Amino acid sequence: MHHLASLGRASRVRTSSGLLALGLATFGLAMAAPASLAGTAPALLLATPARATAPARETDEPAVEYAIRLAPDQDELPVRAAFPTQGAARLTVELPRWRPGSYRFQPYRDRIEIDGAFAPDGAELRWSRLHEGAWEVETAGNASIELRYRLAVNQDERGGMLEGPGTWLYASRGKSWPCRVRFEIEAPWSVASGLDPTSDPSVFEAPDYDTFADCPVLFGELERHVFETHGAPHHVVFRGNVPKELDRQQVLDGVQRIVRTQLDLMQDRPYRHYWFLYTLGGGAGGGGLEHLNSTNIALSGTQLVQNPRAGDDVTAHEFFHLWNVKRVRPAVLGPFDYQRDNRTRALWFCEGVTSYYATLTLVRSGLREPRHLWRTFADEISKQESSSGALEVSAEDASWEVWDAAGPDEPRINYYVKGQLLGFLLDLRIRHETDNTRSLDDVLRFLNSFYAREGVGYAETDLRRAVDAVTGLDSSDFFDRYVAGTVPPPYAEYARYAGIDVELTVKEVRRPPFAIDLAEQPAVRELDRRSQAYADGLRSGDLLLAVADQPMKGTQELRDAFEKSGAVERVAVKVRRGQRELDLSVRPRLQRSVRATATPLPEVGEREQALREGLERGLPAAPRRTWPLGR
């Protein structure tokens, strides 16, 4: 963790208002009165952000030593983990139930098999299963014990990836212990990870379990590239089906522009080295997961050949996460409790505002034209306002309920989408009401300068407080109505601040109440027993023959058949179940469909033009700083 040296120990027991005031002072902002945090807007002066020096980590904690064998011919991955006992008669070890950044429980515990516990001299020790995912070892007075276990393989002939939480056991009382791992691997295979290297090229380390588990490990036949900027090396590693015809220079150019743009924006590089770990396959790709000094991203090699910019958006999103959510984070998201759900109402900010800055990054770096910003704005409006919960589910509720299995017919929204729109709108409002002298950029820099470097998470009410304190505004109505509430946001009004004309076209459409899997014959995807489609007689696996007397070949034909069904209450659906053909009558799902457009007006005033350019170019820019090597 990083601490503000200037605050000292006493700052950690101050009130939230006191902490925020200290953070503003550290950031170079003068606050008119502490009462402003309760709603009265303060008067602020913006100065050059102060950079705090993070003290070197010193610890007398014993280390956990791991070893894992990685080879092409394995059916399982053998792992050895040596834990210090510190004189305890029993030691409890556990495997996480979830991974940070993916807010749902994972089936890690189905993939592990314990082989035994051993003393340093090789003698077997007694151990038992406490409950699912937890084991207890009798130490017999030994200073350390070794647990041996096997994991289900997640690899192909070219290698694979280790997810930290699904790979490494931890001692229940030892998450603060340093961790080291030895990779037993032979050329041409190798490993790539954000873990810190040691003098032994096969051994890597981390200061504690959270950091250790946060670092995914790409292994196998790897293609490596590296560039330096802002005083640090940035590694780009490809694994999998890497096409020979891939324009690597174009891909690397995109990564470099993203890194430089975001480092200039945040004016902070909180890592010594960073790793982009790409797995290329033949599927759609496009998913990624953020980490403190790395990201693992899955991309389609075929799509990347056709368009070397296809990975720009997910790369920009995951890289910005190294600040927003990994360091600027809700208090509940670190240190982690790996055995229970870690709920927060701020995922709209963690994920949605990150998506907003990914979009800004692509425009500000020159990877996309400015019109991309406004097309994205319109597309996200269409998605949000067409969602079943647009008028019923708030951004905060969607964030909180992500851990829950929602019923198939329950209203819902996507907090990524709603959060990105809230980021757009909040930035527009801040810039408008401050004559473009403040922006959401300033808020992010403040949150990073204070909360991240102090090593603490924010209370969820601190987001509004930070906006008000940094900008001098009162944003309570924005947060009450559009973040915590379900009032439709004023898209058109706020977009006009930047000379953008927003229009919404609304209609009611009929949608199929079920999804299909495509094969020789479309089949009904797994149905929830609580769904209306199940009540109407459909079952998972039913082969879909016809809808409204129209033969079914794929998803588009299915959507068209329901949309064109007219005002009928039920639609005729013919399926084959086993040897029988069944004629069913299924209720369509009535859904609001919204199509939004966002068009830059040809003639706007100087104020609107300056605000639009401020968004598109990142103005007013942060004061420049020098970048020392390493850190």
Image (cartoon, grey):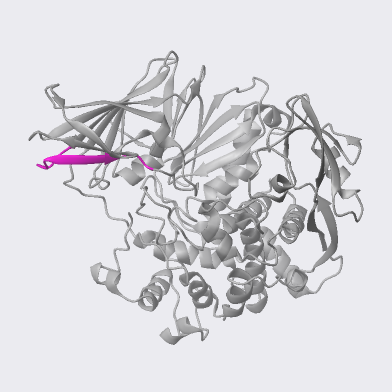
Is residue 50 among what the camera can see?
Answer: no
Q: Which residue is at 49% across, 75% downward? A: 465
Placement of 281 over or under 508, stated as above or below: above
Q: Which residue appears farthest toward the left when viewing the image?
A: 141
Q: Position of residue 154 (x, y in %)?
A: 47, 26
- State left or right for residue 150 relative to residue 399: left
Dividing the picture into quadrants, the one containing residue 475 is bottom right
Q: Quadrant of residue 127?
A: top left
Q: Position of residue 231 (x, y in %)?
A: 44, 45
Q: Residue at x 38, y 70 (%)?
A: 26
Foreground of the two, 136 or 38: 136
- Residue drawn at (57%, 79%), measured in percent from left and top? 476
Residue in front for this viewpoint, 114 or 238: 114
Range of residues picked out in magenta: 84-96
Which quadrant of the structure image shows residue 483?
bottom right
Where in the figure is residue 199, as x and y percent of width and height?
Answer: 27, 29
Q: Nearer the viewer, residue 573 or 364?
A: 573
Q: Is residue 341 magenta?
A: no
Q: Position of residue 394 (x, y in %)?
A: 61, 66
Q: Residue at x 31, y 75 (%)?
A: 14
